[in-house]
Image (cartoon, rainbow, N blue to C red):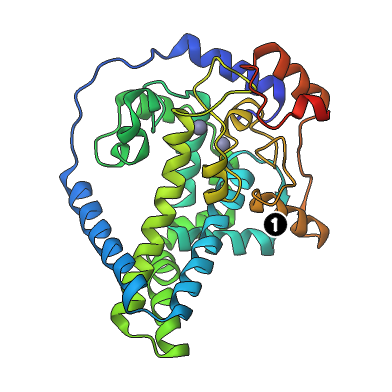
Amino acid sequence: MAPTTKEEYLNAEADFHKSVSRSAPRKYEIVYFSVFKHILLHLCAAYGLYLMFTKAQWKTVIFCMCYAYAGGFGVTIGAHRLWTHKAFKAKLPLEIILMLLNCIAFQSTAIVWIRDHRLHHKYSDTDADPYNASRGFFFSHIGWLLVRKHPKVIEKGKTIDMSDINNNPVLKFQQKYAIPLVGMCCFVIPTLIPIYFWNESFTNAFYLNMFRYIYGLHVTFCVNSVNHLWGNKPYDKNINPTQSIIVSLLSGGEGYHNYHHVFPWDYRTAEIGNNWINTSTLVIDLLHKIGLAHDLKTTSETMVQERLKRTGDGSDLWGVAAKL
Ligand SMILES: [Zn+2]
Ligand SMILES: [Zn+2]
């Protein structure tokens, strides 16, 4: 079973220390196809960024920003908080919408993303962590997508309980029809909308969308890299994950990562869930109000305060201890 309660998460946290060695030296086996693909995608995105400031219509720029945010929610609210961590429950229409938003972001299929992220939590910053930050910034940011997986990632990946996900009809549908769904949601529709509705040129619409796509990838990558390397650790100074307001701002509230690794079941992924930076939480609250989301899991203030005192680095950036 995937850990869902506080006790199960604490046990899993203790287990990985016993079972996985940290930062064993290893030669990288480069996957040249992935390197070529990402160079091409990034060149397209760079041209899109140039067009954004030179030739594109402002409507296309605004549209790309909105579309990036929509796709982001498919990752933060869908793949991350709902499916990976089961931090709340969603009605079927909401699951379908989140699955489509997840296709907009296209960070592999949700099923693959969820398995990688459960591995990341269970074996953080060890060889079994797909984006192991103890191998440095570049590896944890994007390098892990350009080389063959570490054998420990494959070995431990098989032990991750994915039964809830593999039996989810919405996610099975996405997995089965990934190519047409992602093709339409991530590439075709966002290119056609500016052309059809306000006569944008194909070149502008296509390359700006490529920039939107790559930008979204890097925001998520920052949670795996920046948030495991730099920042304060108010809740547990013994782990690598940190708090970063900048990453939170970019990612709709996902940068309170020290908190998130300590209390991963919390749907807010932050102790200060209801602030304007944490837009994913604000959206989940709204979905809860209109009845599409329910059973929102949180962490009690007492538990947060106890953990601050017991294992925090004393930084308590937000003065949470004083407020509680
Ligand atoms: Zn997580
Ligand atoms: Zn992390």
As drawn, 25 above or below 129? above
Query: Is the residue at mark 1 in contact range of ligand 1, meaning its CB lies under 8 Å from it?
Result: no
Q: Secondary structure at mark 1?
A: helix
Horizontal side, residue 27 vs residue 131: left or right: left
Horizontal side, residue 182 vs residue 206: left or right: right
Which residue lies at the image location 31% right of the left edge and 68% below the top edge? Answer: 48
The image quadrant where one finds the N terminus is: top right
For ligand 1, the image quadrant comes to top right
Q: In the rendering, at what x and y percent does residue 169 appear?
A: 58, 55
As drawn, 240 above or below 94? above
**Viewer-side residue, 119 vs 309:** 309
Which residue lies at the image location 30% right of the left edge and 35% below the top edge? Answer: 138
Quarter location, residue 90: bottom right
Quarter location, residue 204: bottom left
Which residue lies at the image location 32% right of the left edge and 75% below the top edge? Answer: 54
Residue 100 visible from this viewpoint: yes
The image quadrant where one finds the C terminus is: top right
Mark 1 lies on residue: 283
Which residue reaches farthest top?
18
Which residue lies at the image location 23% right of the left edge and 60% below the top edge? Answer: 43
Amino acid type indicated by mark 1: Val
Q: In the rendering, at what x and y percent does residue 255 appear?
A: 56, 39
As drawn, 195 above or below 22? below
**Viewer-side residue, 315 vs 7:** 315
